[in-house]
Image (spheres, grey):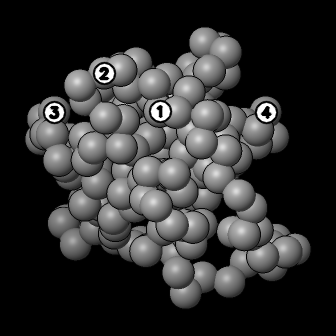
Amino acid sequence: MHSAHACNDETRRTFGAGRSGHGERSGHPGRFAVAVDFHHVAPQHEEIDARLRNWARWCNGKPESGVTPMFRAYRSTDVWAAPDVSAPIDKLDAARIGKAVIDLPGYHRAATQWHYVKPVAPGRAARQIGVTMQTLAQLVQDARTILINRHA
């Protein structure tokens, strides 16, 4: 077993200075923020996303809400059913995914841990990791792809 647990808050580690904006205009002349959908999961990522959510529930010791703080009040017309948080946690699979997350490259690991285990405001997470909000979303998507390609 690794000495570093995959559920540790790796997002506290700062990898450099980054900028991100909130809303339509970031408040800085000439700098606009682009809206980023952190909840979009590509069809080819649905299975690994479900496994990562299982891992997050295992890490947090309780069912996760399925919604990051920024989007708690958002009501999409694309939601057909409430998430099933009563599903039992598959502890063996969670441990496998946890090891695979530890083995991700640093930025991908930090973004994945933010998205699934320690969901703070996206702007704050982007600043902590040292990337833009768009890059943060891309890191989460790329991490899912890496995990699929590594047969995690």
**Quadrant in the rendering for residue 118:** bottom left
Q: CA distance from mark 4 to mark 2?
A: 29 Å
Secondary structure beneath label 4: helix
Tell me if residue 23 comes above or below residue 98 in the rendering: below
Identified at 65% across, 52% down, the residue is: 89
Secondary structure beneath label 1: helix
Residue 63 % position (x, y): 57, 67
Tell me if residue 151 comes above or below residue 8 in the rendering: above
Q: Return the disc, 4 or 1, that comes first in the chain's sequence.
A: 4
Q: Return the disc, 3 or 1, that comes first in the chain's sequence.
A: 3
Return the residue found at the far right: 80
- The amino acid sitting under disc 2 is His
* Residue 130 visible here: yes
Q: CA distance from mark 1 to mark 2?
A: 10 Å
**Quadrant in the rendering for residue 113:** top left
Is residue 152 rendered to the left or right of residue 76?
A: left
Q: Return the disc, 2 or 3, that comes first in the chain's sequence.
A: 2
Residue holding disc 1: 98
Q: CA distance from mark 4 to mark 1?
A: 20 Å
Residue holding disc 2: 2
- The amino acid sitting under disc 4 is Gln
Residue holding disc 4: 44
For label 3, the crowd category at 10 Å Cα-Cα, with few meaning under 14, some 14 to 19 and many 20 or more, is some
Residue 15's mark?
3
